[in-house]
Structure formats: structure tokens, C-alpha cells
Image: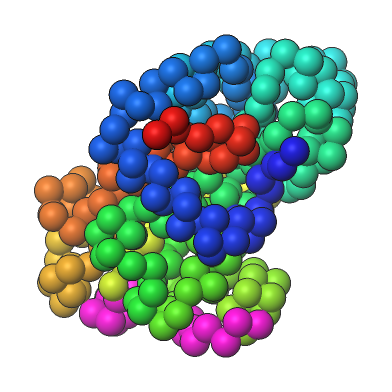
Amino acid sequence: MRSLNNILELSVEEIDELIKTALDIIENPGSYSEICKGKKLATLFFEPSTRTRLSFEAAMMELGGNVLGFSEATSSSASKGESVADTSRVVSCYADIIAMRHPKEGAPYVASLNATVPVINAGDGGHNHPTQTLADLLTIYRERGTLNNMTVGFCGDLKFGRTVHSLIQALSRYTGIKVVLISPEELKLPSYVKKDTLSANNIPYEQTNDLESAISQLDILYMTRVQKERFFNEEDYLRLKDSYILDPDKLVTAKKDLVIMHPLPRVNEISVAVDADPRAHYFDQVLNGKYMRMALILMLLGLNREV
Ligand code: NCD
């Protein structure tokens, strides 16, 4: 039995396999519509979510399975003091697979040690978000035809942004990757990601606080929201929240085939005027996330399309 806590637990070959399955699902949705008949996915969300939870649920439904779960800690026994370990043991009696989001780093990992069914990390605090990365990788692959040879700019809250940490880890295994880290001083990428991922894999990277001067060299621009819920004081959040706002003026010097991404929800980071730009792909990420979650559920349950 296998869980997914961190994107690096999937090999590059397995990620290729997931992309292949997702592309096949897009081509042949009917061949997958009953494959999870009789199976149940539990979504245990101790932190707010729109996309990730609904995307897991839609993914399981489109595979013919059923879903159960809760969308806030207050509606679960966590509010009575139950531990994540006990909750995951209990839910293992009801479901074949669990997707868990939790504000505490490592909580889904603890769940995976105690559950008797696979546990998928659907976001743990300011740490990791491997299934958003699967959505991001499929989006990049569909736009560029490869995951190699590109300069990727990450802009915004690189400190608390778990989607950034997981995507950088995933990209560090491809060739010809350069990274540009664009953030205010206080929201720089944590040094453990720089050291263990970028430096350890000899990925060239630069750090700047200036989006406008960096934008022309980028093939991918990954914008992120300042993670309000991780701040200790509101004043800091208010000062930093609008550090970067991507608008059509800032895109004047950008490449014609730039891929603009954002894991969503967006607050002010991308002006709605950018939505009509053909380079905007943040709503494609949403759909791609559902297909990759379908592929991941099949992989972890050991199910294949009958051919
Ligand atoms: C992200 C998250 O939860 O980390 N959202 C998502 O899952 N698409 C990004 C965010 O909340 O800013």
C-alpha cells in the first residue's frame, strides 16, 4: 500500500506514466467511467479549499466511485480532540483511499503511518502540495510538449507557498531548468528548499524582488497568493499582500509563448485583464488537476483501464 506525501516519492518515470494516463482519460473518458465502481474516497479537509477538495471528489465520481468526508475541522471529531492518527485509522474502515489537507506540516504523513489505506497529501501547512504539482506539470507539458529546458519564474509568497516548494522539487529532476525567485525579502524561498533542492541538483537560480526586470527571460511565470493564514501578524500581511500585481503593462516585454500560471485562489496577484491573454493558463491548471488526480487515484488503488 502506497501513499503520497511528497512529490519526490513519485519517480520521473511514474510522473510520465501519470501524464500518459491523464491524456488517455482526456481522450477516452468513457473507458474510465466505471473503473472505481464500489470504491470510496474520503476527503478529510481540516483547512479551507475549493479546488482541491472538489477536484478530488469530481475525479472519484468520474471514475465511477463514491465520496465521503468533511470540509472543516469543526465538523469532525478533531474539534473534540481526536488525533490525526486515530481519525485516519477510523476513516480507513470506511474508505479505500483518503485525501487529507491539514494546517500542520506533516499531518498527512502521520495519517499515512496509521491508516490502512493510501493517504494523499492535499496540502500540509506551508510545506507541500504534491497534487497541485501534478496539475502544474500536466499544464506545462500540454503547453510546451516537454518538462525540460525552461526558465521558470516563481513570484509572490515563496516562503509559505507550498505549491511553489513542491513544484520546485519536481522540476529539479528535469534537464535545462533555470529558476528565478521573485519575492519581497520577507517572503523568500526557505533555505532548506534552496539547499536541498536547487543547490543539491545544481539548478541555476537567481533571487530578485523585481518582477518587471525578470519577466522577459521567463518561459513560465508562476504567480502565487500571499498566504494570509500563515502570518503571525496582520500588519505584515497587509504590507506585503499586494507586492506583485501582474497586469497587461508588465507583460509587454514577456515572451510571446510565456505560460502564465497560478494555483488559485487569486486575490490581487493577476489582474482580471490578463485573463483574456492567450498566455494565461491558470484555469487550465484547474481542469488538468482533476485529470491528474484521477490518474493518481488509479495508480494508488492499483487499477488500470481494461484494453
Ligand atoms: C493552493 C494551496 O492550497 O496551497 N491552492 C490550491 O490548492 N490550488 C494555493 C493557495 O491557497 O494560495
In the rendering, at what x and y percent does residue 171 appear? 49, 69
> Which span is picked out in magenta?
200-218
Residue 128 vs 8, above or below: the answer is above
**Residue 211 shown in magenta:** yes
Q: How is the image coloured?
A: rainbow
Residue farthest to the front, as pictured: 307
In the rendering, at what x and y percent does residue 161 appear? 55, 55
- In depth, the one of 109 and 273 nearer the eye is 109
Q: Is residue 135 left or right of residue 257?
A: right
Q: Quadrant of the N terminus?
A: top right
Q: Residue at x 54, y 73 (%)?
A: 172
Q: Is residue 228 left or right of residue 277?
A: right
Q: Is residue 209 left or right of residue 190?
A: left
Image label count: 0
- In depth, the one of 290 and 282 nearer the eye is 290
Q: Quadrant of residue 123?
A: top right
**Residue 206 shown in magenta:** yes
Q: Residue at x 69, y 35 (%)?
A: 119
Q: Quadrant of the C terminus?
A: top left
In the rendering, at what x and y percent does residue 220 appear? 32, 67
